[in-house]
Image: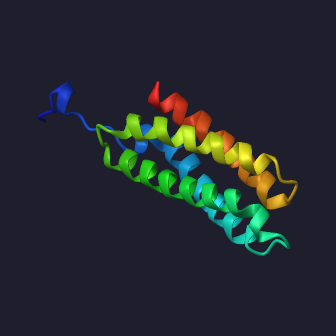
Amino acid sequence: MRTKPKSLVMTGYHTYKSCIDACLQCAAICNHCASSCTQEEDVKMMAKCIQLDMECAAICYAAAQLMSLGSEMAKDICRICADICEKCGAECAKHQTEHCQECANACKRCAEECRKMAA
């Protein structure tokens, strides 16, 4: 049986599973939070939260996809993902709604996983 040289061995889904799972969960919860924020009484007050939720979901999906593909850029995008997750989580933590608190927790977990992965 032939094996690939170490430099050609692909990493991907199984290597990054914990981080991929955290990113996908965070993206889903950020989408839920953004949608729920549009139903709040003062939607204008939630505008920054909604924007960060959408940005966070987008980068989380992209990070999960690049990790699944074994991209050589996965660590770079995970560093950016962690930064955006931290910003989104901090904004959501300011709001006392259940969906924002759930989102803040998911963002914190995702940022931690992305920082570990990118180290």
Apparent side of residue 95 relative to residue 57 in the rendered image (left or right): right
Instruction: Identify the image quadrant of residue 77.
Output: top left
Which residue sits at x=48%, y=52%? 59
Q: Quadrant of residue 43?
A: bottom right
- Which one is nearer the viewer's eye here, 66 or 35? 35
Residue 117 visible in the displayed image: yes
Q: Quarter of the image containing the N terminus?
A: top left
Which residue is rendered at x = 41% and y = 37% of the image? 15
Q: How far across and down, in percent of the image, does residue 4 sit?
A: 15, 33
Determine whether 104 is above or below 79 in the image.
below
Q: Nearer the viewer, residue 41 or 62?
A: 41
Q: Position of residue 21 (x, y in %)?
A: 55, 49
Residue 25 appears in the picture as rendered: no
Is residue 77 left or right of 54 when viewed as pictured? left
Residue 96 on image: x %, y %: 88, 54
Closer to the camera in the image, 67 or 92: 92
Residue shown at 68% from the left, 40% from the top: 108
Q: Is residue 57 above or below residue 37?
A: above
Q: Is the residue 48 above or below the residue 7 in the image?
A: below
The x and y percentages for residue 12 are 35, 43
